[in-house]
Amino acid sequence: MITRRLTTSMTALLLLSGMLAACVSVSTYDQLNQQLSAEIAQGQVHITRLQGAIKVTINSELLFPSGGWQMPPAAAKTIAEMAPVLAPMQTAQITVTGYTDSTPIGPELRQQGIDTNQQLSLKRAQTVTQYLISQGVKPNLLSANGLGDADPVASNDTPQGRAQNRRVELNLVGAGS
């Protein structure tokens, strides 16, 4: 496993992980690094290259407001920077999975029909999926899942840990893998 991790004090993260047919090419890894260089420099994005996968972790506040699922313009810009790298992978199935922290859903979200963290995480994954489609990724190659507060990557006992647990993962799986 080859790991490259660029970190700063920013700890709120979303996650994009990729797996291609046989392995993720160094070229794809390098393209994502280049496309997201400003966000990496600001500590809003971390990129890890694994055997057969790429994981891009994005600061959750960059993509979604707290308790929300609509992307502000800065978030759309970040996803738009990834799309030119992802769109040419026309044989890769991309599954977008959303996660939340364990904070219970509040009354404002309940009024909007969101009763669980699983529903909120699904809305976030669907938002990213729809934006990728708008940027040229084939819709038949995308699916969205929401897992709520399942599979935390940090403790939900601190604000920093909860921020790390709010993320979205994109898994790219090529034909024949």
Image: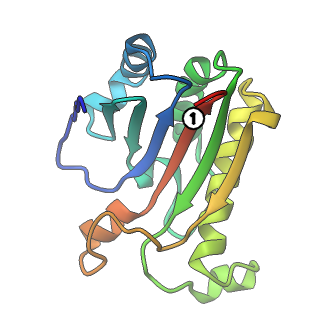
Which quarter of the rendering shows the N terminus?
Answer: top left
Report the colour scheme: rainbow
In the rendered view, would you say 44 is above or below 176?
below
Tell me residue 67's x, y (percent). 54, 70
In depth, the one of 151 and 168 nearer the eye is 151
Residue 145 shown left or right of residue 85 in the figure: right
**Three-letter residue code for mark 1:** Leu
Q: Quadrant of the C terminus?
A: top right
Residue receiving disc 1: 172
Could you tell me which residue is drawn at 43 percent across and 47 percent down?
15
**Which quadrant of the view contains residue 4?**
top left
Q: In the image, residue 109 lies at what x, y percent?
A: 65, 79
* Relative depth, front residue between 47 and 76: 47
90 versus 129 height, above or below: above
Of residue 79 and residue 149, the one placed in the foreground of this image is: 149
Q: Is residue 116 above or below residue 53?
A: below
Of helix, strand and loop, which one carries label 1?
Answer: strand
